[in-house]
Image: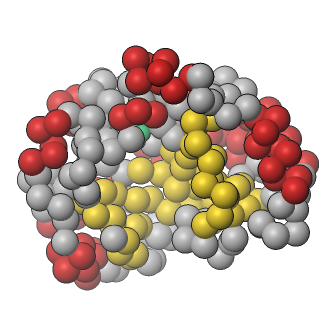
Amino acid sequence: MLITAITKFTTIDFPGKLACIIFTGGCNLRCAFCHNPEFVLPERLEEMKHSAISFETVMNFLKARKGMLEGVVICGGEPTVQVDLIERMREIRLLGYAIKLDTNGLNPGVLRKILMEGLVDYVAMDLKMPLNYEKELVGVTVKDGVLEESVNLIMDSGIDYEFRTTVISGVHNEQVLADMGGQIAGAKRWALQAFRNAKTLNPDFEKVANTQRGELERLAEKMKGIVKEMIVRG
Ligand code: SF4
């Protein structure tokens, strides 16, 4: 597992749990608006490899924080591209930690194994646009049905979860969000979060305005009733 960073303490990234965050390097998408290009682009990852954190270091940290931290958030990049993800999750699990997995949903096969083995307590899946993602926005062609499979796996899993959307001016409007909502109708939770233009994979997106909280609240209000709970972040 390529671990690029650790946040040692968070009260907001794992609902209901005091947690730390493990950031993994590498992703199977190339979202134009991605604000972590250093965790995604192979040439940037090469630069980071010398400062990567070993899994042993992470385990030592987790052993030392037992009783203080309750959970571990694994995010990316995209964690499911790590070939040893499941093995590492088992090891974290054995220490007694709850695990939250952040994923873009492109690897339903890995997600299925994780869910079947009971290795995760909370899944947050990105929903970037209506499920037939446009290559211009996410950088790769996503096979038909892949994202729907992940959505269904999560919604049928019985564990806690959320879908989350970074709302970007010029990409998302009320109609687009309504279309997206229709694809996760009845879901437990949908979080709308603000786009920030400070650093993006495609520099063109640095010219796009930051999303205002008022706009997120307006859109969330309009989407009420499609899912059980709407959340606004940012
Ligand atoms: S936004 Fe997420 S899914 Fe998209 S390229 Fe960045 S890390 Fe990968």
| Closer to us: 221 or 43 | 43
Q: Position of residue 224 (x, y in %)?
A: 31, 80
Residue for point 34% across, 79% down: 225
Is 124 left or right of 8, judged from the image as shown? left
| Closer to us: 84 or 229 | 84
| Above or below, 218 relative to 45 | below
| Quarter of the image that includes the N terminus | top right
Ligand 1 sits in which quadrant?
Answer: top left
Residue for point 41% across, 50% down: 126
Task: Name the quadrant containing residue 175.
Answer: bottom left
Task: Name the quadrant containing residue 212.
Answer: bottom left
Q: Position of residue 168 (x, y in %)?
A: 19, 56
Q: Residue furthest front?
A: 51
Q: Position of residue 54 (x, y in %)?
A: 73, 32
- Please indicate, yes or no, whether residue 181 appears anywhere in the rendered image: no
| Above or below, 168 relative to 231 | above
Is 119 left or right of 29, judged from the image as shown? right
Q: Position of residue 140 (x, y in %)?
A: 30, 24
- Please indicate, yes or no, whether residue 35 appears anywhere in the rendered image: yes
Residue for point 59% across, 22% down: 50
Number of numbered discs visible in the structure rendering: 0
Residue for point 53% across, 31% down: 25
The chosen color scheme is secondary structure
| Quarter of the image that includes the C terminus | bottom left
